[in-house]
Amino acid sequence: MVFLQLHDNFKPKDYERLEKFIQDWPKEVPLAVELRNSEWFADEEVSNKTMDLFEKHHITNIIVDTAGRRDLLHMRLTTDTAFIRYVGANADSDYMRLDHWVKRIKVWRKGGLKNLYFFVHQNIEKSSPLLSAYFIEAVNKEFGTDIHIPEMAEIKNKF
């Protein structure tokens, strides 16, 4: 799946550009789009028009869960694929938020969710593998999967 992250200065005034891009996108290449400007979600009419466009063209709408930007946490799926960009806050609450995601994914799965992309990162990226491992363990336990938890590469000093 191709991940297109649009800059915060790309706003609903640019809808026609987005529409043209999506119409021209090759149908055989799955695409997920992240709209970063809150104006896409603040106006219900704009949001619905955009999500309808995504649904019509089978474009996955990226859901962003960032502790400091709750305006992008819209929870609307536009395909049978969920693409979550999860940004931790390097806080204990990150684990609770991940637990909530496992519950949400379970509901979506019962509703027909077929694919999941869950992108984990944080302000202090050294902690991202720990969060990722926690999430993988929770998913494996809840869904009976056997997703491998990657081992951390040993960092060697250059000098």
Image (cartoon, rainbow, N blue to C red):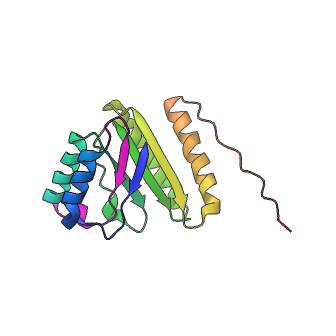
Assign the C terminus to one quadrant of the image: bottom right
On screen, 42 above or below 135? below
Segment tinted magenta in the rendering: 26-43
The residue lying at 63 percent from left, 36 percent from top is: 148
Report the residue that reaches farthest toward the bottom: 9
The residue lying at 31 percent from left, 37 percent from top is: 27
From the viewer's side, name the closer residue of 31 and 35: 31
Report the residue that reaches farthest toward the left: 45
- Magenta span includes 30: yes
Residue 10: percent from the left, percent from the top? 29, 66
Q: Quadrant of residue 46?
A: bottom left
Residue 1: percent from the left, percent from the top? 43, 42
Q: Quadrant of residue 45?
A: bottom left
Q: Is residue 17 left or right of residue 82?
A: left
The residue lying at 22 percent from left, 52 percent from top is: 20
Residue 114: percent from the left, percent from the top? 38, 32
Report the residue that reaches farthest toward the right: 159
- Magenta span includes 32: yes
Q: How many marks?
A: 0
